[in-house]
Image (cartoon, grey):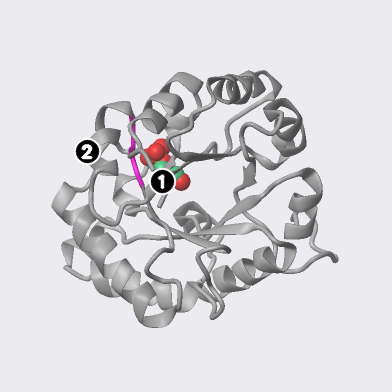
């Protein structure tokens, strides 16, 4: 399967940063699939500037298609703006917006309803890993955040250990392999296409560690935060993806 290198810009990016998307498109990486998820304010213009060369996604959506939900954006609105994917259940949403597994599952269903590829994020905190509960925590998140009906076409998983996000710390290759193998087994047990559903790794991926991380069994790509903000770094990570 082709690896997917996805960039999550989080709450970064003004108009000037659209040039980075143009630069990524101009490089036309062909060894992997790519995706950039800018803030909602830039999605429509990012789609224009990407000229079809860089698929554009979003970072969150509301579960309803429309309604009295001030400040929220629906999956249908994201599609209307030209997005093809949406991240749901990122640990920053779970932490700062108190999103439960059940809320994440509703958002995943909304994304499917609108026809978006859904990137569902899971991952343990430092305390949960210290207690040796990481496999159990991620199993619960996979069970409760992923609705029945997940397929290789509509869903990608992102394993993002909370303690590795934005910290410069990454798990060892053995720790990543253990967790991705665990997630793979959970997906196979529950979904007909679980064997081929992509499992991305996220948390302090950068050009200097991309080669090692992307070479680990059951790592089908990366969800990149900080290093996705500069085209050169993002492209260096994409270049490290395994050829199809
Ligand atoms: P960093 O790559 O900045 O650690 O962020 C990872 C992340 O949260 C991507 O969704």
Q: Residue at x 59, y 20 (%)?
A: 26
Q: What secondary structure is marked by label 1?
A: loop
Residue 43: image quadrant is top right
Real-space Cα separation, disc 1 to disc 2, in angstroms: 14 Å
Which secondary structure is most common in the magenta stretch? loop
Q: Which of labels 1 and 2 is toward the front?
A: 1
Outermost residue to the right: 67
* Left or right, residue 118 beside residue 144: right
Q: Which residue is mark 1?
A: 3
Q: What is the span of residues highlighted in magenta in the rendered image?
A: 202-206
Mark 2 within 8 Å of ligand 1, using the beta carbon: no
* Left or right, residue 237 beside residue 7: left
The quadrant of the picture showing ligand 1 is top left
* Left or right, residue 182 beside residue 103: left
204 magenta-colored: yes
Residue 84: where, in percent of width, then height? 67, 49
Q: Which residue is mark 2?
A: 212
Q: Residue at x 48, y 32 (%)?
A: 30
Q: Nearer the viewer, residue 124 or 192?
A: 192
Tag of residue 222: none
Outermost residue to the front: 244
244 magenta-colored: no
Q: Residue at x 76, y 69 (%)?
A: 64
Crowding at dot 1, Cα within 10 Å, few <14 / some 14-19 / many 20+, comes out as many
Q: Nearer the viewer, residue 197 or 72?
A: 197
């Amino acid at each position: 399967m082709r690896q997917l290198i996805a960039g999550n810009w989080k709450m970064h990016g003004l108009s000037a940063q659209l040039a980075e998307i143009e630069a990524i498109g101009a490089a036309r990486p062909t060894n992997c699939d790519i995706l950039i998820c800018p803030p909602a304010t830039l999605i429509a213009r990012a789609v224009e500037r990407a000229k079809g060369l860089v698929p554009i996604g979003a970072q969150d959506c509301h579960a309803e298609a429309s309604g009295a939900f001030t400040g929220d954006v629906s999956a249908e609105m994201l599609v209307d703006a030209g997005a093809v994917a949406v991240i749901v259940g990122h640990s920053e949403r779970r932490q700062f917006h108190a999103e439960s597994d059940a809320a994440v599952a509703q958002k995943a269903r909304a994304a499917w309803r609108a026809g978006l590829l859904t990137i569902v994020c899971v991952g343990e905190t430092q305390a949960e890993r210290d207690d040796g509960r990481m496999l159990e925590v991620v199993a619960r998140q996979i069970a409760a955040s992923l609705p029945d009906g997940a397929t290789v076409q509509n869903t990608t998983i992102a394993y993002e250990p909370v303690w590795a996000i934005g910290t410069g710390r990454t798990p060892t290759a053995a720790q990543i392999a253990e967790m991705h193998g665990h997630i793979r087994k959970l997906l196979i047990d529950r979904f007909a296409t679980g064997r081929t559903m992509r499992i991305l790794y996220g948390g302090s991926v950068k050009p200097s560690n991309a080669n090692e991380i992307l070479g680990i069994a059951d790592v089908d790509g990366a969800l990149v935060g900080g290093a996705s903000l500069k085209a050169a770094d993002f492209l260096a990570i994409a270049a490290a993806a395994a050829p199809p």
